[in-house]
Amino acid sequence: MTATTVTRLPKALVLTRHLAAPREQVFRALSRAEHLRRWWGPPSCPVVECTVDFRPGGIWHYRLRSSDGREHWMRAVYRDIVPPERISWVEHSSDEHGAVTTALAATFATLTLATAGGSTLLTAELRYDSTSDRDAAIARGVERGFSAALDELHTLLGPTPATDTTTAVRDGSPSQGGIDVPDHLR
């Protein structure tokens, strides 16, 4: 597997990951409930229920179950969809009926998919209203959890040569720019 790189910005996290699949295939895995159920969420907190109305203004409502049995409902409203290049949404915690709750701060997510040779570069930009909201997301494990979910997506998309599975975290400074790309994906 390839590594997920996480860059911390003052009010955002940017995660990048190379996936050895065409971007159309990756886009399908991001846009259909039957696929999202198989990979969204880390193994310790998988999706156990999911509905998707995949259109601008449509709602993605899902339930995660953590390893201790607690359930977490989330509700996302799609803002922008450009097949197979970009998907954006705003996500909130919710109840089982989809009503927004204040348990977690809103996340403004944009996923972009770029063709990179025979693979796809997925870039997830997670924006928050404040640095403290970003820090709370980090404390809840969003970096590890999103990276683990991308490991699950990698597995769903099919086998590729084994490489590093670690997550690299960067602070967003210019000296740490660039993306670590395994040789087999160059």
Image (cartoon, grey):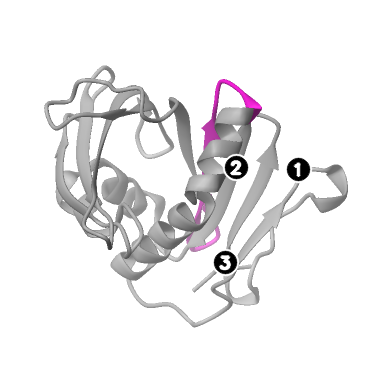
- The residue where tag 1 is placed is 172
- The residue where tag 2 is placed is 14
Say if residue 114 shows up in the picture.
no
In the image, residue 159 above or below residue 133: below
- Residue drawn at point x = 43 percent, y = 77 percent: 160
Of residues 118 and 35, the one nearer the viewer is: 35
Of residues 147 and 99, the one nearer the viewer is: 99
Q: Secondary structure at mark 3?
A: loop
Q: Is residue 159 shown left or right of residue 3?
A: left
In the image, residue 139 above or below residue 11: below
Q: Amino acid at mark 1?
A: Gly
Q: Amino acid at mark 3?
A: Ala
Disc on the earlier residue, 1 or 3 = 3
Residue 51, x across and y down, in percent: 14, 37
- What is the C-alpha distance between the residues marked 2 and 1? 9 Å
Q: Is residue 10 shown left or right of residue 162?
A: right
In the rendered structure, does residue 118 fall within the stretch colored magenta? yes
